[in-house]
Amino acid sequence: MTLAEIINIHEKPLLELVFEAAKVHRLHHNPQEVQVSTLLSIKTGGCPEDCAYCPQAARYHTDVEAEAMMTLEDVKKSALVAKANGSSRLCMGAAWRNIEDGEDFDQVLEMVKTVNALDMEVCCTLGMMTEMQAKKLRQAGLYAYNHNIDSSNDFYKEIISTRTFDDRLKTIENARKADLTVCSGGIIGMGESVEDRCAMLLTLSQMDPQPESVPINGLVAVKGTPLEDQNQIPIWDMIRMVATARIVMPNTAVRLSAGRAGMTIEGQALCFMAGANSIFAGDKLLTTPNPSRNADMEMFEILGLHPMESFAKGDRPADVKYVYSEQTDTSKAVWERPKHRLERNVEYAKLGKKSRNEADTFKQ
Ligand code: SAM
Ligand code: DTB
Ligand code: SF4
């Protein structure tokens, strides 16, 4: 499909669009099944990147404090709670620019092994990753890697200056080379145009194979970030985005992700009708609130939905095709560090630094 064709779909009269998407959805999926994932922030805050939307970037002044990595024991406990609450997948997130080989990464490999042994799909989102790191994760039992392209190639430059869009694509390629399933999507509500939203869907839909999961996040505008003043997106924008994603990626799990806390059940019902078939469940996303488990159970009950089993769409990663050997690990990560800086981000970084200094003076 071309960009113009995707924009054409996106701009159809709303109910026509929902109807078209619902037809595609019913041809490729059981419309009563929703894949339920739980997010777990295994390493929160203190991130060196400048993603304008992110409360975990060290340079902004948000309420998120940098924390130490979670212990294996605590990860296991959280995974068991998530499983008991109906999640088939656990997605472990770290506020890293990229994976660094060493103690922390080895600890993540142990976490992956532990959660895989609980019969859950394990997903990680750890920033940029080399092919070898991807293969190590796969061998530990990782099922999916989440790495969002976030927006169109053009708009990306307005929100992040510390790494490039191409770097993101490279990591996704590395995940594929390691035989991992790919979860990649983006955010709407950052000030981008309809064309940017559709260009993002074009990039995702042109991946071969298309991502198995596409999270559509509504921006959670967090105080202290450069995007703190963005208005919440109208629900109609989310419905259009979900429906268009469903039509251009018929087999993909389209996930209602960040921003659900600000949506009504009626709004979410239209998203499910339009082809959404996955959610993040649990009271917290990574650092921001999400609807409570009880609210989601009630919603499922009202709408006649039920959670999908683990590995319903693919095999459990038991027979790993690739076995890595340390000798062959010659890959050195060469991620770009672009020189451009976003003025707005620089300004917010200064504010963050100033207020942290003031807080330190106060403590003394
Ligand atoms: N550090 C890793 C990375 O950037 O790939 C993994 C964690 S990062 C928090 C994962 C994704 O969360 C981002 O790519 C972005 O799409 C989403 N995200 C972060 N903050 C958000 C916000 N305030 N609202 C909506 N989505 C957000
Ligand atoms: C994704 O697309 N959304 C999730 C997950 N993948 C990692 C993260 C949403 C984060 C929202 C902001 C926060 O809670 O910090
Ligand atoms: Fe860091 Fe990821 Fe947040 Fe960007 S989105 S600041 S890379 S944690």
Image (spheres, rainbow, N blue to C red):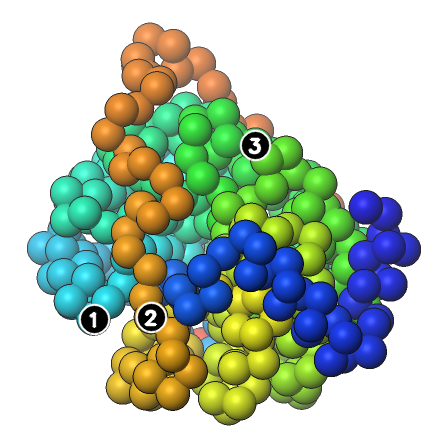
Q: Which amino acid type is marked by label 3?
A: Glu
Which of marks 1 and 2 precedes in the sequence? 1
The percent coordinates of residue 111 (x first, y second) are 20, 45
Cα distance, mark 2 to mark 1? Answer: 12 Å
The residue singled out by tag 3 in the image is 173
Cα distance, mark 2 to mark 3? Answer: 33 Å
**Mark 2 CB in 8 Å range of ligand 2?**
no
Residue beneath the point at 28% across and 37% down: 316
Q: Which mark is residue 306?
A: 2
Does dot 1 land on a helix, a strand or a loop? loop
Residue beneath the point at 52% across and 82% down: 269
Q: Pick whichever, 63 or 192, lies toward us.
A: 192
Q: Which amino acid type is marked by label 2?
A: His
The residue singled out by tag 1 in the image is 85
- Residue 203, visible in the rendered structure: yes
Select label 3 or label 1 by which is in front.
1
The percent coordinates of residue 293 (x first, y second) are 28, 81
How crowded pointer 1 is (Cα within 10 Å; few <14, some 14-19, many 20+) is rated as some
Q: Is residue 111 left or right of residue 33?
A: left
Label 3 close to label 1 by CB (< 8 Å) = no
Q: Which amino acid type is marked by label 1?
A: Asn
Does dot 3 land on a helix, a strand or a loop? helix
Vertical arrangement, residue 160 with respect to residue 144, above or below: below
The percent coordinates of residue 29 (x first, y second) are 49, 56
Which of marks 3 and 2 precedes in the sequence? 3
Select label 2 or label 1 by which is in front.
2
Number of numbered discs overlaid on the protein picture = 3
Residue beneath the point at 55% across and 38% down: 172
The percent coordinates of residue 198 (x first, y second) are 77, 59
Select label 2 or label 3 by which is in front.
2
Q: Pick whichever, 303 or 179, lies toward us.
A: 303
Q: Quadrant of the C terminus?
A: bottom left
